[in-house]
Image (cartoon, grey):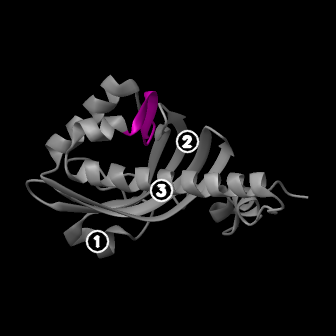
């Protein structure tokens, strides 16, 4: 029997509905729903803070030892995360991140994991970049609030708006201004996607 993919395992966990047989079970279900909703709010507030260039709010969405991983380039802790986001904020005159799908799995009373997808429009002085991205997240409750303990972003594409159509053809869909085109992170890098093409 083949090993189950991480996504298949997540789907299996998400499809199970707990039996509610007593008041304590009901409390646990409600607590889980409230925690998931708070984490979903965290993701939306993060996007708004990035778009508003509210650096203190962005940094505050991470735990004190949190990690922001942008395609393998890691910023660890509030000081490095602040520097990483300030660099992006200086590059883009305006940003619009639109969160879309978001799945959260509670792994304990104070921890959770999840993934979120979305699109972005990033305006530089000369062009607008259109991007599709996916985050893999780990969340921790710190000081009574859910925060990112780790946030890793990967891209399906990032291309100038005027290259949107032709820029999506082929694997080199990372077309940041001033850099050579480079391969995108997914779907080609996903094992199940590659296996389906063999």
Q: Is residue 157 positioned above or below 145 on the image?
A: below
Residue numbers of the magenta segment: 61-73
Q: Which image quarter holds the N terminus? A: bottom right
How crowded pointer 3 is (Cα within 10 Å; few <14, some 14-19, many 20+) is rated as some
- Residue 190 appears in the rendering: no
First of labels 1, 2 by sequence position: 2
Specify the label residue 40 is tagged with.
3
Residue 172, percent from left and from top:
40, 58
Query: Between tags 3 and 1, which lies in front?
Result: 3
How crowded pointer 1 is (Cα within 10 Å; few <14, some 14-19, many 20+) is rated as some
How crowded pointer 2 is (Cα within 10 Å; few <14, some 14-19, many 20+) is rated as many
Taking the magenta stretch, the answer to whether it contains residue 71 is yes
Query: Between tags 2 and 3, which lies in front?
Result: 3
User: From the viewer's perspective, is 128 left or right of 98?
Assistant: left
Cα separation, mark 3 vs mark 1, equals 29 Å
User: From the viewer's perspective, is 153 left or right of 165?
Assistant: right
Contact check, label 1 and label 2, Cβ < 8 Å: no
Main SS class of the magenta portion in the image = strand
* Residue positioned 42% across, 55% down in the render: 41
Contact check, label 3 and label 1, Cβ < 8 Å: no
Question: Circle 1 is placed at which residue position?
Answer: 164
Badge 3 element: helix
Residue 42, percent from left and from top:
42, 50
């Amino acid at each position: 029997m083949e090993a189950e993919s991480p996504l298949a395992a997540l789907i299996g966990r998400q499809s199970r509905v707990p039996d509610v047989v007593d008041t304590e079970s009901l409390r646990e279900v409600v607590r889980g729903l409230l925690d998931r909703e708070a984490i979903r709010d965290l993701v939306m507030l993060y996007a708004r803070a990035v778009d508003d260039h509210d650096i203190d709010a962005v940094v505050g969405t991470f735990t004190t030892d949190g990690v922001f991983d942008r395609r393998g380039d890691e910023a660890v802790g509030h000081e490095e995360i602040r520097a990483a986001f300030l660099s992006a904020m200086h590059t883009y005159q305006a940003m619009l991140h639109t969160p879309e799908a978001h799945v959260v799995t509670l792994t304990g009373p104070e921890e959770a994991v999840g993934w979120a997808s979305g699109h972005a429009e990033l305006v530089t002085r000369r062009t607008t970049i259109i991007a599709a991205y996916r985050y893999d997240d780990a969340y921790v409750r710190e000081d009574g609030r859910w925060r990112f303990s780790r946030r890793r972003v990967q891209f399906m594409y990032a291309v100038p708006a005027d290259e949107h159509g032709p820029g999506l053809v082929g694997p080199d869909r990372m077309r940041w201004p001033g850099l050579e085109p480079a391969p995108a992170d997914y779907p080609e890098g996903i094992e199940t996607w590659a296996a389906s093409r063999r």
